[in-house]
Amino acid sequence: MTWLGHGTVLIELDGVRLLTDPLLRDRVAHLRRQHPPAAVPADLDAILISHAHRDHLDLPSLRMLDPAVPVLAAPGATRALRGSGHPVRTARPGEALEVAGIAVQVTPAAHDGRRMPFGAARPAVGFVGGGVYFAGDTELFPGMAELAADVALLPIAGWGPRLGPGHMDARQAAEALALLAPRIAIPIHWGTYRRIGAPEHTAEPARAFTAHAAELAPDVQVAVLEPGETLEITP
């Protein structure tokens, strides 16, 4: 698992390379990256898009990647992806699909996944494949307890001082961890981008998540990565 920052994770499973919600630019609208530039992954087998918000579906980032790589995307994201140059397949909550030879379960997500600011509400999704759960953006939902994953990639914060509906803070992410009961948890969606003019982020969300996880899910190993850092996981 290589966390490239925000919701972007390079997942390597027995030679298969999957990339989640690629956000690779130094500046996105009013947000600036406060870490070194993200490496642009090559030799990808598929790209997973959880929803259409611009910090998860970034067309300029997608255009940095090989256009032949297929995209598996939430229903609300497929229209925006027409300009990406990639072949696109819709992923609906509850579907079981095959991606590059790996069985992938498309999970629900409690998050409005529409392309802002227009359009009707559309579902966001998460993905479970190869024993890895990528939550995208979500609140807690009861079905989390039914997801079977060895590794959980969980959002624990955002890019601003407050979180709106459809997100988890560090405490809520630890509560999700208690439902999921994976072997390893990697916190994502924190500390990478900040608003122009805002103070730099600190590691406080990761510290808080680690402390809450120790209380609520003590059997789970929490691995805090810096953007660009890789965690090797053995069966």
Image (cartoon, helix red, strand yellow):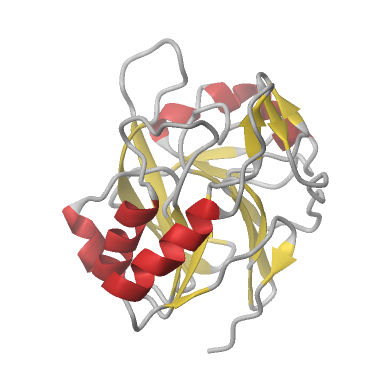
Q: Is residue 76 visible?
A: yes
Which quarter of the picture shows residue 162?
top left
Residue 52 drawn above or below residue 158: above
Total residue callouts: 0
The residue positioned farthest toward the top in the image shown: 118
The answer to whether any part of residue 84 appears in the image is no
Q: Position of residue 141 (x, y in %)?
A: 22, 50
Residue 35's x, y, as percent? 76, 46
Q: Quadrant of the N terminus?
A: bottom right
| Residue located at (39% from left, 30% from top) | 113
- Residue at far left of view: 142
Query: Is 181 left or right of 23, judged from the image as shown?
Result: left
Residue 23: percent from left, percent from top: 67, 39
The residue shown at (42%, 44%) is: 91
Q: Quadrant of residue 125?
A: top left
Q: Which residue is at a point 56% across and 26% down the rendered structure image?
A: 54
Measured as percent of width and height from the top left, residue 140 is found at 26, 50
Looking at this view, is 59 or 219 the one in front? 219
69 and 116: which is toward the camera? 116
What residue do we see at 58% from left, 88% from top? 234
Above or below — where is 82 with respect to 101? above
